[in-house]
Image (cartoon, grey):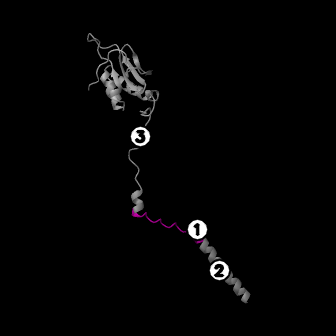
């Protein structure tokens, strides 16, 4: 009889253990504690406006003239698309706004010696021993940009240029 009693007890314990295991698997998950104030302060809400990723060429201050030609060209093409496309000052101002050194620039006149609009204008930026040079105008068609060797006198353009005094 003691043996039967022990078997019954074992059966009851097994049944209770099994029901605890089954019930444990069916219980809803416990709510997670809310973050402490210090943790909540470090979490940032997503920005309503995504931060733009720079695309296209950019100024490479430590680069060569060739490294900067794509950026120079991009600026020249942007000015060419405006009503000021045959005004030298527009190119100088845009290049300065793009980070190029105004003191290293040259530009030819917008008008001929008799007051007619220039068939083309040239502008340049001295970059080390080289020059970024652009040419635009009705006689040129689309803008032309290139890298040329700098002149021995420290300039880029041959002939008469106008002062950049603005």
Q: Which mark is residue 25?
A: 1
Mark found first going from the N terminus, 1 or 3 = 1
Which portion, as a residue range, is magenta?
22-37
- Is residue 23 magenta-colored? yes
Q: CA distance from mark 1 to mark 2?
A: 19 Å
Dominant secondary structure of the residues highlighted in magenta in the image = loop
Horizontal side of 140 relative to 15 (left or right) equals left
- Image quadrant of residue 143? top left
Residues tagged 2 and 3 counted as in contact (Cβ below 8 A) = no
Q: Give the secondary structure at mark 1.
A: helix
- How crowded pointer 3 is (Cα within 10 Å; few <14, some 14-19, many 20+) is rated as few
Residue mark closest to the camera, 1 vs 3: 3
**Secondary structure under badge 2?**
helix
Image x and y of residue 159, in percent: 34, 14
Q: CA distance from mark 1 to mark 3?
A: 48 Å
Whichever of callouts 2 and 3 sits on the residue coming sooner in the sequence is 2
Residue at the (41%, 24%) spot, across then down: 132
| Looking at the image, residue 25 lies above or below residue 125 | below
The answer to whether one can see residue 83 in this image is no
Q: Is residue 103 visible?
A: yes
**Residue at label 2?**
13
Count of numbered circles in the view: 3
Query: Where on the picture, by quarter, is residue 22?
Result: bottom right
Choose the circle earlier in sequence order: 1 or 2: 2
Q: Residue at x 32, y 21 (%)?
A: 88
Residue nearest the viewer, comparing 76 with 132: 132
Q: Distance of mark 2 from mark 3, alpha carbons?
A: 65 Å
Give the secondary structure at mark 3: loop
* Label drawn at residue 146: none
Report x, y in % for residue 135: 38, 19
């Amino acid at each position: 009889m003691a043996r039967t009693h022990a078997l019954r007890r074992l059966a009851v314990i097994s049944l209770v253990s099994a029901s605890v295991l089954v019930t444990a698997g069916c219980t809803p998950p416990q709510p997670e504690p809310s973050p402490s104030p210090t943790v909540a302060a470090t979490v940032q809400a997503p920005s309503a406006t995504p931060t733009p990723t720079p695309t296209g060429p950019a100024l490479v201050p430590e680069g060569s003239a060739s490294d900067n030609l794509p950026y120079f060209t991009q600026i020249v093409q942007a000015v060419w698309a405006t009503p000021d496309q045959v005004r030298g000052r527009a190119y100088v101002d845009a290049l300065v706004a793009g980070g190029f050194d105004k003191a290293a620039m040259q530009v030819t006149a917008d008008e001929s010696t008799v007051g007619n609009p220039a068939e083309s204008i040239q502008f340049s930026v001295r970059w080390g021993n080289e020059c970024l040079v652009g040419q635009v105008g009705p006689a040129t068609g689309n803008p032309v940009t290139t890298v040329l060797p700098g002149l021995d006198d420290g300039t880029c353009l041959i002939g008469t240029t106008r002062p950049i005094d603005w």
